[in-house]
Amino acid sequence: MAATIQELLDILALEPLEHNLFRGRSPQVGWQRVFGGLVIAQALVAAYRTVDGRPPHSLHAYFLLPGDPSVPIIYNVDRIRDGRSFTTRRVIAIQHGRAIFSLSASFQTVEGGLEHQIAMPDVPSPEEVPPLDALTTRLPEAAEGLAAHFSSKRPIEIRPIDIERYFSREQRPPLFNVWLRAREALPDDPMIHQCALAYASDMTLLDASLLPHGRSLIESSIAGASLDHALWFHRPFRADEWLLYSQDSPFSGGGRGFARGSLFTRDGTLVASVAQEGLIRIRVDRSR
């Protein structure tokens, strides 16, 4: 198993400390703050550990403070409700005695019902999209953070369909599509795949709100951070198979960007939906 995937599985293997209390860690890769998708995924694991036999159908989260990657994160689960069809959990992530993140998750007994879905966009297949490793020689100085941002050291492989947006300041419509998957095969446990998707869902989404402005989060002059995050699971899927993450941004303003995402399997099945608001500020050079 590749080291990056083992790292992801280690991240999701929370240590139980006490009833409703778990401890998670961050990979020591030199990040200045904890990756938001990591906290979402670990909080979902903590909630999952207190629920029997029901998969999650939605989660809603707020990022309260930047996470410190040098120390563990404590997850405190509040068992809000155990109903006949639905189970509700609230999770607080704590570091240095303060809440850095909160999540509410709802789990539901599997049942049938009326069904419909939107169509998947018509885009090139992942095999037709070059891997980011093949593009590093094209990186100008302005995009030097691209290789690090989508580093092969990450457990999720990402193939942006419109890679040219990273090489241009051209203003584009707020639409962005990427293929993503875990870099290696994952265990069959559906919890692992849902939590891996929760991890990946925080990657690239906020960047869609910068397309109309010809900017990107990989620029050192842009300060970006997730503020909140919502994720809905619709159908079963595997996170180690290609998923199309189709993103759009209806609005940005007030120093915030709002983006939405739909995740499809290769055959066009909609398996999850995402919404996020994040901070987007232009850094001011005060040395001048």
Image (cartoon, rainbow, N blue to C red):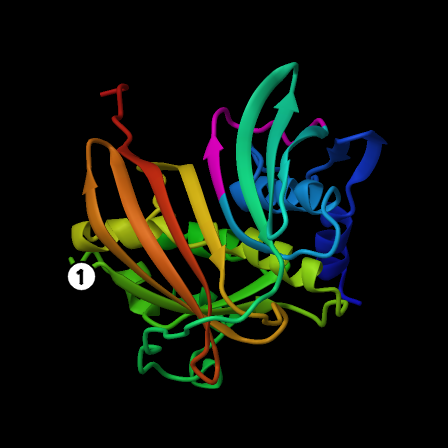
Give the camera-side residue of 244 and 230.
Answer: 230
> Badge 1: how crowded within 10 Å, few (<14), some, or many (20+)?
some
Q: Does residue 7 appear in this view?
A: yes
107 in relation to 223, above or below: below
Dot 1 amino acid type = Arg
Residue drawn at the location 37% of the way across and 46% of the way down: 276
Q: Does residue 141 appear in this view?
A: no
Instruction: Give x and y (percent) for residue 17.
Output: 84, 29
- Farthest front residue in view: 84
Give the camera-side residue of 225 and 234.
Answer: 234
Instruction: Give x and y (percent) for residue 122.
Output: 31, 82
SS for callout 1: loop
209 in relation to 262, above or below: above
Provide the residue span drawn in magenta. 60-71
Kindly indicate the quadrant of the structure image that contains residue 252: top left
The image quadrant where one finds the C terminus is top left
Residue drawn at the location 57% of the way across and 59% of the way down: 197
**Main secondary structure of the magenta stretch:** loop
Task: Give the residue pinned by disc 1.
Answer: 172
- Residue 87 lies in magenta, yes or no? no
176 in relation to 199, above or below: below
Residue drawn at the location 64% of the way across and 23% of the way down: 94
Residue drawn at the location 60% of the way across and 53% of the way down: 85
Instruction: Give x and y (percent) for residue 37.
Output: 55, 46
The image quadrant where one finds the N terminus is bottom right
